[in-house]
């Protein structure tokens, strides 16, 4: 498998920036989008529980409503694909069983051999992690967001991660208030407009000696 040279990786990451103006006429090709959905599917999560659902919004009327619930940020309607990352604030015993069923099937492990692991996971979720479960599953969405943005950058797709939105309004607009899922964050994906002045602005990052403590 070909690997990226370090300088090519950095060139991709340097080229990534939070896009303010997308070119509404440019759509992500289907094959690229399918790969990006697979990249999202491949996102790692704690224990592998995948406590999320990714809503991909193409409908123009829905996008208009979501834009109104995002402080009128134009990226919502102008990007090619708009993704809303939602989490399950609760993790149920049935979620753990769903995961163990998939694990058993994917790795051909008899289900009964996973009972020890089941105990470990449930012991954690019902024990020390119990008070933080909601925050914990919310955090998983940020792993997916980071993975998605980097994957996009590697295939030349531009993004804008978006927390500037009202999650409860998003839940209403998406009609998920009665489901198990709740909005955490969103990401617009597509191609930058040539008029986006942000593209040429210098990156603002602290020096490495402030960021790293190597021992
Ligand atoms: C979780 C998250 C939420 C963000 N929310 C918004 C947003 O709502 N609107 C926006 O224009 N930029 C948003 N940004 C972009 C950041 O301001 C931007 O990533 C940061 O200033 C660094 O700049 P760069 O990404 O262009 O390198 C968000 C970034 C992150 C990581």
Image: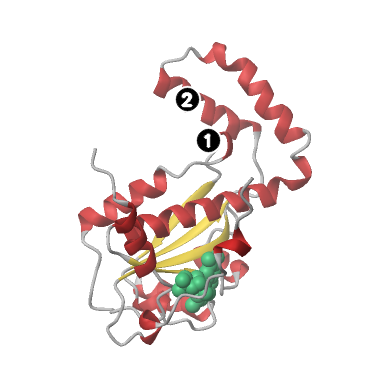
> Seen in the image, is 82 located left or right of residue 24?
right
Secondary structure type for disc 2: helix
Q: Residue 25's quadrant in the figure?
A: bottom left
Tell me: is circle 2 under 8 Å from ligand 1. Answer: no
- The x and y percentages for residue 138 are 62, 53
Question: Where the C terminus falls, by quadrant?
Answer: top right
Question: As drawn, is 92 to the left or to the right of 197?
Answer: right
Image coloring type: secondary structure
- Residue 135 in the image: x percent, y percent? 68, 52
Label 1: how many residues lie within 10 Å, few (<14), some (14-19) or many (20+)?
few
Mark 1 C-beta to ligand 1 under 8 Å:
no
User: At 36% from the left edge and 80% from the top edge, which residue is drawn?
Assistant: 199
Residue found 60% across the figure and 72% down from its top = 166
Left or right: 62 as drawn, with respect to 4? right
Q: Mark number for residue 48?
A: 1
Classify residue 81 by image quadrant: bottom left
Q: Secondary structure at mark 1?
A: helix
Residue placed under numbered mark 2 in the picture: 103
Expressed as whole percent of the image width and height from the top left, the position of residue 8 reads: 29, 57
Residues tagged 1 and 2 counted as in contact (Cβ below 8 A) = yes
Mark earlier in primary sequence (1, 2): 1
């Amino acid at each position: 498998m070909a690997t990226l040279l370090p300088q090519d990786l950095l060139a991709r990451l340097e080229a990534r920036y939070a896009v303010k103006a997308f070119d509404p006429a440019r759509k992500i090709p289907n094959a690229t989008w399918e790969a990006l959905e697979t990249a999202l599917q491949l996102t790692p999560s704690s224990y592998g529980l995948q406590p999320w659902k990714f809503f991909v919004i193409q409908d123009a009327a829905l996008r208009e409503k979501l834009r109104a619930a995002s402080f009128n940020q134009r990226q919502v309607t102008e990007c090619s694909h708009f993704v809303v990352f939602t989490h399950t604030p609760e993790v149920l015993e049935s979620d753990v069983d769903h995961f163990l069923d998939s694990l058993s099937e994917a790795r051909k492990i008899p289900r009964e051999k996973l009972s020890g692991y089941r105990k470990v996971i449930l012991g954690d979720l019902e024990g020390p992690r119990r008070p933080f479960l909601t925050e914990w599953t919310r955090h998983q969405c940020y792993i997916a967001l980071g993975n998605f943005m980097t994957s996009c950058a590697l295939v030349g797709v531009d993004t804008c991660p978006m927390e500037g939105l009202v999650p409860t309004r998003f839940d209403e607009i998406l009609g998920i208030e009665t489901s198990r899922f709740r909005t955490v964050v969103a990401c617009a994906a597509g191609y930058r407009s040539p008029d986006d002045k942000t593209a040429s602005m210098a990156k603002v990052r602290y020096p490495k000696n402030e960021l790293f403590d190597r021992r």
